[in-house]
Amino acid sequence: MLTRVEQAQRQWGGANNVIDKWLADRQAMLVAYTELAGLPPYQRQDSALPSVTEIKHFCQLLVDYICAGHFEVFETIKAQTPDKSQDIAEILDRVYYSTDAALQFNDKYTQLNDTEILEGFDDALSRLVQYLDKRFELEDKLIGFLLKHD
């Protein structure tokens, strides 16, 4: 997924300030995910679960990214590509499924305190990243509409 972000930044970087910031936010969120999941280069020494602080940090980046998409990027794309409104509406309908999944994940895991057990966390994180992977693909289509329109 980080490779996809880097490709998007190379392809569209510098073309639109809103998109540039959003892609940087996506990258920051994915780096936090990689750390949280203990993926290379952030492998954990043992099989311990991440701390509540790490989870809350990831959730904050996740929600910031989701909100920026809905309240800044998608609105910009719709306003600047009225001839693609039907295509955009269809893609956004599909994007909203991942929004619900992300917000449910956030709601569940930002309410934790340091003494709670994280039973099922790895599975929930894995399901979330599957939604996000599809979301990034759809978002990249939306960015393509905007930047081909300019």
Image (spheres, grey):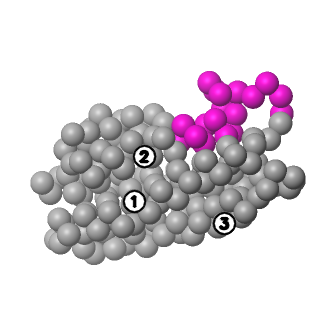
> Earlier along the polypeptide chain: callout 3 or callout 1?
1
Q: Kindly identify which numbered label has been placed on residue 57.
A: none
- The answer to whether residue 33 is magenta is yes
Q: Is residue 97 above or below residue 62?
A: below
2 is higher (above) or lower (below) than 93: above
Q: Secondary structure at mark 3?
A: helix
Kindly identify which residue carries mark 3. Answer: 107
Name the residue rendered at 79%, 24% in the picture: 45
Q: Position of residue 34 (x, y in %)?
A: 61, 37
Q: Measuring from the top left, give residue 60's x and y in whole percent.
A: 56, 54
Residue 126 is at least partly visible in this image: no
Q: Which residues are magenta?
A: 30-47
In the image, taking residue 50 as reference, residue 24 lies left or right, namely left
Residue on which the image places disc 2: 25
Residue 6 image offset from top left, x and y in percent:
39, 34
Distance from the alpha carbon under mark 3 to that under mark 2: 20 Å
Q: Which image quarter holds the C terminus?
A: bottom left
The secondary element bearing badge 2 is classed as helix
Measure the C-alpha gap from mark 3 to mark 1.
Answer: 18 Å
Question: Is the residue marked by circle 2 packed among few (<14), some (14-19), or many (20+) residues within 10 Å?
Answer: some
> In the figure, is residue 15 to the left or right of 27?
left
Residue 68's disc is 1
Q: Position of residue 28 (x, y in %)?
A: 48, 41
Q: Is residue 39 left or right of residue 31?
A: right
